[in-house]
Image: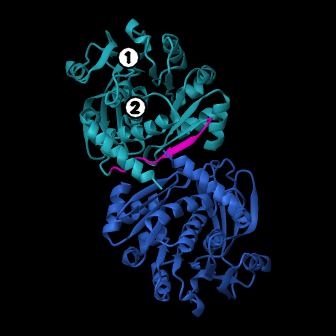
Chain colours: A blue, B cyan
């Protein structure tokens, strides 16, 4: 089984929904990714936390056999995010963010991580993503995340990364912005023409779509009635996708199945405040949801 | 082959997009429905037009063998709608609407229509829908459309219709509003508990979902790059669905295939101003798109 590497944030989140408020939850993209991917394959985390990062969270990573050798500790406060969701639990606003610790973060892979064949380059500047990519010896499948701020301010370096990775995993708005289009089919065509091999569009409650040069594949979201907190769903989605792929290997069939497992992990992530639900889920439950997804798309 | 009946509007539309403006196009829900459904089965139209309704449009219906015996002509102006789409061709505003002719419209089915086994009760007041339903002798599959205004102002009569029809075909917002929920899974459960047999959710560019007591089935939208005018897509969707079902008969497999044909007809509808594209499409093209849809959802 191939381990999967993730470079991203490990954070302390304060989250408000119309019903509840929870403070200082374990959060961050690398956290949600790891907790989803570890159901399929070993995980290696590269990130940074502050001196105030609670030992109980380190214990959780340790207990779940998530390798944190690449998790640096800096003499700052851990990255914090405070957000509030709207009535529908879809839109959200950031009330405060403390990302001083990320300013100085220069991801250095431990020597033991250099042989990672599967990796997520989490949402950082393209320069940082490029820097990580150069430290990977011969990766099989590297997935890129990004967001609107990098598309606006670092378009060229970001575009230069597209031919060097194996997939880009973003939402529809970001894909349209990156391709300067109002049509997703056109946007996908342009990004593939720019050298991208695989575009994965996250559509939240509407599912996800994967577009490669050879095929397109679309799945709905897993139908869950218990949406508690959407935080981390996209990162858990990426973790399910890459974790399954690292476990099984890359081919057209596994790519499709990986998209279903991604959807399943995203559905679990939203069912609790913070990452409890994906941390505690067991493989039989994950496989049951996968089987239900297969039924929902079967003609 | 069973004919399919539609009760709905036949209109003259003026449509503006960021690129073009077209005036007095043939429009209306019954029009788009008929032009889509007629690819699969004979169609019977119940509606009303004014003395100003152009002969060329009547000729089109006639040429395509759409039965307009139930299309009344009143001494008023034909129903007119003038709308403008936003940059993304998703949101739209109504600039003007002339629906005086609909005030007096009391749909009366010609005697020859009473044996219709498949029918769409288009978006009118629940009282009007009930009135049409009573004129159908022993329908096999009746589908209901509605919109926010009826959900707000005629909730009780609308709810009373749910157990009497076979499917409700609406968008996600309408389903949430009707079930008073913010979660689609919960909304679907409530509507099925209220006696509905089949809920069909139209998700526009994100596809569609069908939920019955026995199964759920989701499909993406057909990936078209050439979105010109979204008007009528939902009605063409309904026409493809019911037309295919009337042709093949109702079972779980045909319901799923009908949802794919619905999606195909919706995708054709958006590719031209007005209904030209669904009027002129040929069955081989429709079947090619169906085959592509099957590929896109195949694991």
Residue occupying the far top of the picture = B111
Label disc, if present, on residue B266 of the rendered structure: none
Q: Is residue B17 at all visible to an observer of this figure?
A: no
Residue A143 vs B178, above or below: the answer is below
Q: Main secondary structure of the magenta part?
A: loop
* Residue at x-position 25% and y-position 36%: B282
Q: Position of residue B53 (x, y in %)?
A: 26, 18
User: What residue sits right under mark 1 in the picture?
Assistant: B47
Query: Residue at left 53%, top 87%?
Result: A115
Q: Nearer the viewer, residue A148 or A131?
A: A131
Q: Looking at the rendering, which quadrant does residue B281 occupy? A: top left
Where in the figure is residue A135, as x and y percent of width and height?
49, 89
| x and y percentages locating residue B197 in the rendered image | 59, 29
Q: Which residues are magenta?
A: B213-224
Q: Which residue is mark 2?
A: B244
Q: How many angstroms separate mark 1 from mark 2 (CA)?
A: 22 Å
Could you tell me which quadrant the N terminus of chain A lies in? Answer: bottom right
| Above or below, A121 relative to B207 | below
Chain for numbered disc 1: B
Subunit that carries the residue with mark 2: B
Say above or below: B228 vs A152: above
**Image side of residue A96 versus residue B145, left or right:** right
């Amino acid at each position: 089984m191939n381990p999967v590497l993730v470079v991203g944030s490990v954070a302390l989140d304060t989250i408000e929904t119309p019903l509840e408020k929870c403070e200082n939850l374990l959060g961050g993209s690398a956290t949600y990714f790891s907790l989803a991917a570890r159901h399929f394959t070993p995980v290696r985390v590269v990130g940074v936390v502050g001196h105030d990062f609670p030992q109980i969270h380190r214990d959780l990573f340790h207990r779940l056999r998530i390798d944190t050798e690449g998790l640096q500790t800096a003499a700052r406060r851990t990255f914090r995010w405070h957000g509030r969701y709207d009535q529908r639990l879809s839109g959200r606003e950031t009330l405060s963010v403390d990302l001083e610790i990320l300013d100085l973060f220069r991801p250095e892979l431990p020597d033991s991580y250099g042989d990672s064949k599967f990796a997520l380059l989490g949402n950082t500047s393209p320069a940082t993503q490029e820097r990580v990519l150069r430290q990977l010896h011969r990766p099989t499948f590297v997935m890129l995340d990004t967001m609107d701020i990098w598309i606006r301010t670092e378009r060229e370096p970001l575009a230069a990364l597209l031919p060097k990775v194996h997939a880009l995993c973003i939402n529809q708005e970001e894909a349209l912005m990156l391709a300067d289009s109002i049509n997703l089919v056109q946007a996908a065509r342009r990004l593939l023409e720019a050298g991208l091999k695989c575009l994965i569009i996250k559509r939240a409650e509407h599912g996800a779509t994967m577009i490669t040069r050879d095929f397109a594949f679309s799945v709905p979201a897993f139908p869950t009635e218990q949406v508690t907190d959407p935080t981390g769903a996209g990162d858990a989605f990426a973790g399910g996708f890459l974790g399954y792929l690292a476990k099984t290997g890359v081919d057209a069939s596994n790519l499709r199945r990986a998209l279903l497992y991604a959807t399943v992990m995203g559905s679990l992530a939203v069912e609790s405040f913070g990452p409890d639900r994906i941390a505690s889920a067991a493989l039989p439950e994950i496989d049951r949801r996968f089987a239900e997804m297969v039924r929902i798309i079967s003609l």
